[in-house]
Image (cartoon, rainbow, N blue to C red):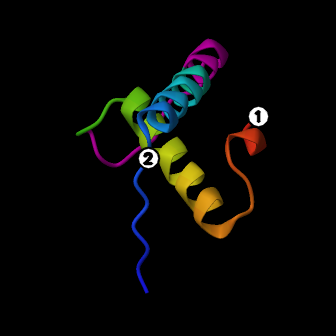
Amino acid sequence: MVERIVLTEEEERHCREIALKRHHLNEARGYQAHRKFDGYTDAQIHVIGIVGEYVVRRATGVGGFDSFD
């Protein structure tokens, strides 16, 4: 069975905030992305990643936003 998860506006906003914080920390540390696809910016990739992490945590019941650092 495929479960469809729709994020609320608040969840989307919170994911963006976490992703941009992570992105800015990486920039400050001098980390460079080594991605194979240039269709998205580093910040956009962080947002996609955080949304994915959040959805998996929510779907499996192992945590929500409280489990991000």
Q: Amino acid at mark 2?
A: Leu
Earlier residue among tags 2 and 1: 2
Q: Which residue occupies 60% across, 27% down? A: 22
27 is higher (above) or lower (below) than 60: above
> 57 or 37, which is in the foreground?
57
Q: Which residue is mark 1?
A: 69
Is 61 on the left-hand or right-hand side of 13?
right
| Magenta-colored stretch includes residue 5 | no
Instruction: Classify mark 1: residues with Cα within 10 Å, few (<14), some (14-19) or many (20+).
Output: few
Q: In the shown orientation, is residue 28 left or right of residue 13?
A: right
The quarter of the picture where the C terminus appears is top right
Element type at marker 2? loop
Q: CA distance from mark 2 to mark 1?
A: 20 Å
| Residue 36: x %, y % from top left | 34, 49
Residue beneath the point at 23% across and 39% down: 39
Q: Main secondary structure of the magenta part?
A: loop
Residues rendered magenta in the picture: 24-38
**Camera-side mark, 2 or 1:** 2
Which class describes the residues within 10 Å of circle 2: few (<14), some (14-19), or many (20+)? few
Element assignment for label 1:
loop
Residue 31 at what x, y percent from top left?
A: 59, 26
User: Within the magenta stretch, is there residue 28?
Assistant: yes
Q: Which residue is disc 2 drawn over?
A: 7
**Residue 37's x, y, as percent?**
29, 46
Residue 4 image point, x, y percent: 39, 67
Amino acid at the residue labelled 1: Asp
Q: Nearer the viewer, residue 33 or 23?
A: 23
